[in-house]
Image: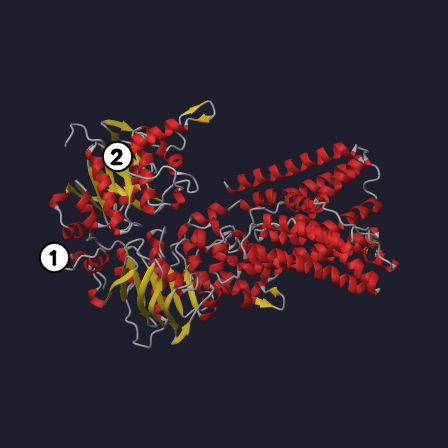
Amino acid sequence: MTAETINPRTPRAVRGLPSLRAGAQYGVLWATLALFTVLAVTTPGFATTDNLRNLLDQQATVLIVAAPLTLAVIAGVFDVSASAVYVLAPLAAIQVQNQTGSIPLAVLVALTCGVLCGAVNATFVVLLRVNSFIATLATSYVFFGVGYLVSDQAILTPGDAAFRDLATKQILGVTSATWLAALVVGITWFLLTRSRMGRYVYATGANPDAARLSGIRTGGIVAATLVLVGTSAGFAGLVNASQGMSAQATDDFGFVFTVIAAVVVGGTSIAGGSGAVWRTVVGAVFIAMIGNGLNLNQIDPIYQRIILGVVILLAVALDATARRRLTN
Amino acid sequence: MTTPVPFLRLTDVHKSFGAVHALRGVDITVEAGTIHALVGENGAGKSTLGKVMAGLHRPDRGTVQVQGRTVDLQSPRDALGHGITIVAQELALVEPRSVLENVYLGSEPHRGPVVRTRLLRRWFAELTERTGIAVPPDACVQDLSIADQQKVEILRALARGAEAIVMDEPTARLASHEAEGLVTILRQLAASGTTIVYVSHFLDEVLQVADRVTVLRDGQLVSTSPADDHTADSLVEAMVGRSLASAFPAKQLPASAAPLLEVENLGRDGVFAGIDLEVRPGEVVVITGLVGAGRSEVLQCIVGDRRADHGTVRLCGATKRFRHPRAAVDAGIAYVPESRKTHGLLLETSVNGNVSLPQLKKLTRGLSISRARERELVAAAITRVGVKAANPALPVSTLSGGNQQKVLFAKALSGDPVLLVADEPTRGVDVQAKRQIYDVLVDLASRGLGVLVVSSEMEEVLGLAHRVVVMRTGRVAGQLAGPDITEANIAALAFDRPAGGSPSNDAGGTS
């Protein structure tokens, strides 16, 4: 078309933007690196291989759920039932393992349990259009309840000692749990940044109408992310049971809030449409390092809670301010 | 009825929205206690003028005087302070709450934190008696008809001491007997001293209700005169007639081939009915008519975003029943929605990401998207429509409005469609970008695509269309082709006036 009608506004508005963007975009990364440096210098015992290995190992279950939850949040939905699935799936798995003696079958049961729970959530959120927070809060109680039924309110322990190897086998210096977390992070990172589904996830969260009119089946995308979260929550529960060689029914929502904290501190917007898996990894590490640093400095766990809460608030508020400045 | 000082006087008022000059030096005087109508075609500036009076828009230039004093209406609140308020087309009520609560929302009498409900009821009874507007005070607003909801808005305006009410297209969503009821109410209000500014494109109604009529065209004043001096035909004549501001590419006659798109008796309950139209390869068909006639909804049914309740859609001879836009995209229909911000683009996503979005299936190799192929496809698509993006990896929000609109076209065309469906394709873009979009549309048609456009801009309709479908209140009022496509004929169909009188010739320069 007529090439002489170049709009002079475009290049000028854009010039100088990348560096500014980089500052705000990677804020959480700089903060994490700074925290690492500070802890390494001030806290004896922090920057040791053993401590860092432990830190990763402890974060494995959180990361296994937080990475897929990042996809769901970007697509515009929440899932607080991850805790319940995390409790329920290993109970079912251990029961099956103890009756059949098969560990692979136990893994399969845990994953299937996660898929089913995710599918139940998706049914209510996508087909019946229940707000995702409310729907998954309600299904949580159902899943918790089923957990008590499956375990008959007993503490279950796997009969086969090899069950422990699932999460605790040392491979190239780190635990298999760490490797499994890395695998899940890798898969979700690939899905989000390289695959068609990833693009559709962003589009669905950013502007569902535009996405639908572009021919994206937005309901299917939301359902897929919820099933993914359910499956990984079941898997994470199994890893956790393997680490502790036991599983017990509870109604404890604590786990999912740690997971959500990692996603949010990383900078994925709960409004949907923007975020990244690497952000969630950084967020999880940031939170873990704070806990670890406070422990090593022998701060009373009561104060640790307060400090953690304040730090999360500060991180998110700073992030929000920086982004607002960027868009103005 | 005339008072020495007019209630409202606007002098040399200008207002621009980006590149669109909506008001160009309008002078208008509204006498107290009269009903003053503003009429004009879509985009003539009548709504904008009404919103300036009510403080919703601040004029770029010019003065506003209320009862002889010059004022600066910075907000609707300011305007209300001077006794002016607006009842907008989209009603602003708290729907799940009662009529009483809505009428006095924000101005409840109270003793400490406790609302004095009994006093409120007495006030409400007095208000309804004084005005003769009857609405049950305890009814829930969402259970009321649109007409009754409108009464609630009027009551609320009066309860806050409004002396002048701007009514923006008040009858657009009302049934005819409801519209008559509204006219009666407005007459009573005017008789008791309230000033009414009545924005409408229903001419018979305007003549019935108004004391004076101001005609606007292209943001300029045509005339202000007593309603008795006008007939509906004389109003249409005053509204019509202009020169074509931007040149259009020459129309090329389409080859007479079998129709690409055939729509038969299409209907959606309560919105439109009995729509017949067809688009041949190489043909540009424009659906026009007044805003609210159901034009956009027809397009939405054709592209599978809404379900039609009746009728059939055939594409290339085969009957199609699209249940999701995906199916329409796959069948070769490209859709450019009316609002690029809310329905078209992902503003914070890159140009690349937007344009390739409907085509990712084709770009996927194995599990991952081929970035090289994506860049290739996007580059070809944006060159075709003339997008000037410094870097297609930057977010769409960094582009000008015109370029954003072209990105929307590039996205629609990236899949090599057979039919392009576009809703108001040049909304909110400047003249240059408009011409480029026209070039794209004509170029596509010359390559054998069918092009179906909804447009409210008369010059666009005249300049682009091989055939015009005029809609009125959910039905096809008539179709025009070739030399019959004139502004007078279109306006006659759109406003339901038989064509005739003196034809306006200065609109016919469509080569």
Pinpoint the chain carrying mark 2. B
Q: Name the residue under label 1.
A: B501
The answer to whether residue A183 is seen in the rendering is yes
Q: Residue at x 40, y 45 (%)?
A: B142
Q: Nearer the viewer, residue B113 or A37?
A: B113
The local secondary structure at tag 2 comes to helix
Q: Do the residues labelled 2 and 1 touch (CB within 8 Å)?
A: no
Q: Name the residue under label 2.
A: B131
Based on the displayed image, in which of its 4 quarters is residue A176 positioned? Answer: bottom right
Around disc 2, counting alpha carbons within 10 Å, would you say few (fewer than 14), some (14 to 19), or many (20 or more)?
A: some
Q: Is residue B398 left or right of residue B479?
A: right
Pinpoint the chain carrying mark 1. B
| Three-letter amino acid code of the residue under disc 2 | Thr
Image location of residue A2, percent across then percent down: 37, 59
Q: Is residue A150 left or right of residue A321?
A: right
Q: Which of A95 and A232 is in front in this view?
A: A95
Image location of residue A322, percent across then percent down: 57, 39
Q: Nearer the viewer, residue B181 or B137?
A: B137
